[in-house]
Amino acid sequence: MMFENMFYEITAILLVAAAIGVVGLLLRQPLIVSLLAAGILVGPSGIGLISGHDQIALLAHIGIALLLFVVGLKLDLHLIRTMGMVALATGLGQVVFTSVFGFLIALALGFAVIEGIYVAVALTFSSTIIIVKLLSDKREIDSLHGRIAIGFLIVQDIVVILVMIGLTAIGGQTAAGWSVFAQLFRVLGTGAAFIGGIALMMRYVMPALLKYLARTQELLVLFAVAWAISLATLGDALGFSKEVGAFLGGVSLASTPYREALSTRLVSLRDFLLVFFFIDLGARLNLAVLGAQVGNAMIFSLFVLIGNPLIVLAIMGYLGYRKRTGFLAGLTVAQISEFSLVLGSLGLSLGHITMETMGLITLVGLLTIGVSTYLILYSGPLYERLSPWLRPFEKKMPHREAILDTTAAVPDSDIIIIGLGNFGSGIALRLLQRKRRLVGVDFDPEVLEAWRKQGLPVFYGDVGDPEILEHLPLRRVRLVVSTVRDRDLNLSLQKNLKAHGYPGKVVLTARHEEEAQDFLAAGADIVLRPFFDAAEQAADSLTAALHVFTGGSGWPGTLGIFRLEAGSLLAGRMIGDISLRQETGVTIIAVTRAGKTFFDPDPHLPLYPGDRLVLLGEPEGLARAEAFLALSQITEADAEEERFSLAEIPLAADSPLLDKSLAEVKFRETYGVSVIGILRDGRHLSAPTGKEILQAGDSLIVAGHSEIVKKLESRAPF
């Protein structure tokens, strides 16, 4: 034992993992591989640093439980319904293919029948934990291939759980005196009772309990962790697995309004605990036993790395998906799972397989996990190289994805927007308000469906797909806008547009100034900088909030309404290009134009002569802004209808707005005013975001047209 104190041992393990992680980063290695290498180094096959295997394994199990809990928390029942057929067909098809041919390979290599079965079954399962982590890191979890992959990985998890339950029943029937069928019947009955109990909790207990706990965010998160671990423990005690229990725990909270807040807060804790999972996995590898199995392991690894993706590609092509979707989804099954190691351990404990066979399964796991990580991380360039050889896996009309497109019905368009996330959707909405004709492109079927219902022509596609441009109406548009914040993908898009002879303008989105300069050097006509603009606007809002509110709230401030004169040098410029906050200390909270008011105006909103600007700040700052912008102040007599004011609106103890986020309440759309602050327990919450949950005792500081504000004050408390 190297350390007598477990705390010292954990400290040393984390330092080694961090050091190897840094080396891996310098060598452009994925973190998962670095953590597995760290596990091997600190394990018995390395320097033997680990003595507290049980403690490390405990942290690993908690990390796995939290990962599956978060997956269940984000489970979309609509996704299961829409992806059910392809997930079931692909998942079961791959399991049958791999197990049958894996068994034949095992027999050809001289394995006994029972050991061949174990090896074949172990090869069929892919790691949900690793795939979810990789897809999340690549922001592909909501893409079509990501949704399909998660669907058939869940099918695989269900199959492996059933297999382990069956093996446990067979292995324990003699000692328990049960028949196989009786044992399986008991397990099915217990499972039904388990799910039924969770369903009753979801229906009658969780809504009221979570509403009460949400008064304290820390307590809500603590309860979520306790709930996840409790159901994981109960699932394990009932003869299923910790993973199944934790997953069902997440599903039980997925329909509540707190799931996004919980998943966001649990991500860091989950990622930290998963470090111990990968270290524990690497530490358990016995290199002495593995040496004799290297040849067989190479054969089985090649079978998994090549055979599994091909069968998924073939099934999805037959079902009508494009070859790129099938290829990217297929890469997610090019490794075996941690469940495979669990299955091998179970067979070893039951006396069905030898330590040599267990070593083989372990080595195949190490090889396939390591190699498939690279395949997934570099799936884009890999597809570009292999695309010409994948044509036999795609039908002439891939109808499954063709139904996501409506661009064929668009006779003419001005702009193509690639990427309809939060930023892209905001741009699309404002361009549509300006009567521009758009075509939207995204890889999330849910996003496409939402826009299709609003009448926007949409196209399913990924900016990383080199063939995407062949399907877009490039000759009929003047502007291609990519809101994707990825340097390599944007540069590839710019290059492919040039290769296709696109004559229009190209707009790319940069995360920082260095990327922006790279895009301009590559030929982009305009570069958007959403993070810079958002940061500047947020800084303005936060600084302004120090001087904003009425004497009753303890935050003094003044509103002023001004007209932008025709001679102003700022006329025609966007709000984000005006250093108003830095120069004058005031903030534009609304712009009125042609009878329409834009609250919290977007940084890209241009200002025109005649616009009425609602400014917020101290009197001295308003005077400086008047001179700085060449404004003329509008008196109450000049524009009665344009008067703005502030008010403090308290929430009633039984208000229907409690426990909802500002985004859910849609305060501006519903009541016609902007929430620019919250008074809570004597604290001032400035510039609250849409994720802020309203709590009992809150008072909302609102800004808007005076008449509307007066009506709201007369209705208070809400």
Image (tube, rainbow, N blue to C red):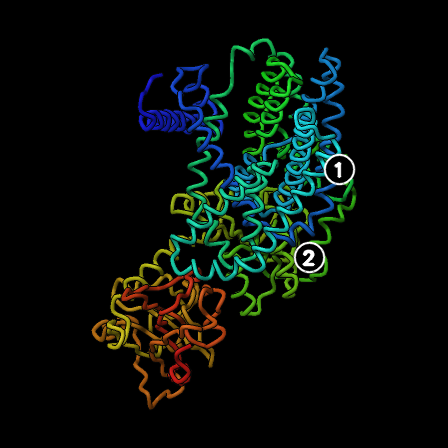
Residue positioned most to the top: 292
Residue 644 in the image: x percent, y percent?
36, 80
Q: 35 or 634, which is in the foreground?
A: 35
Q: Amino acid at mark 1?
A: Ile
Residue at point 39%, 43% (across, down): 514
Closer to viewer: mark 1 or mark 2: 1
Residue positioned most to the bottom: 637
Q: 189 or 497, which is in the foreground?
A: 189
Q: Which quarter of the figure is the C terminus placed in?
A: bottom left
Q: Which quarter of the figure is the N terminus placed in?
A: top left
Asked if one can make out residue 306 in the rendered structure from this viewpoint, the answer is: no
**Circle 1/circle 2 CB separation < 8 Å:** no
Residue denoted by label 1: 315
Residue 88 in the image: x percent, y percent?
72, 42
The quadrant in which residue 349 appears is top right
Residue 536 in the image: x percent, y percent?
34, 58
The quadrant in which residue 699 appears is bottom left
Residue 501 in the image: x percent, y percent?
62, 46
Q: Amino acid at mark 2?
A: Thr
Residue at point 72%, 10% (across, down): 110
Q: Which numbered tag is attached to residue 407?
A: 2
Residue positioned most to the left: 620
Up-down relation of residue 139 to residue 55 (above or below): below
Residue at point 54%, 70% (across, down): 433
Look at the numbered disc 1 and give the secondary structure of its residue.
Answer: helix
Up-down relation of residue 304 to residue 61 (above or below): above
Give the class, few, some or many, for how many residues have Cα within 10 Å of label 2's Cα (few <14, many ≥20).
many
The quadrant in which residue 642 appears is bottom left
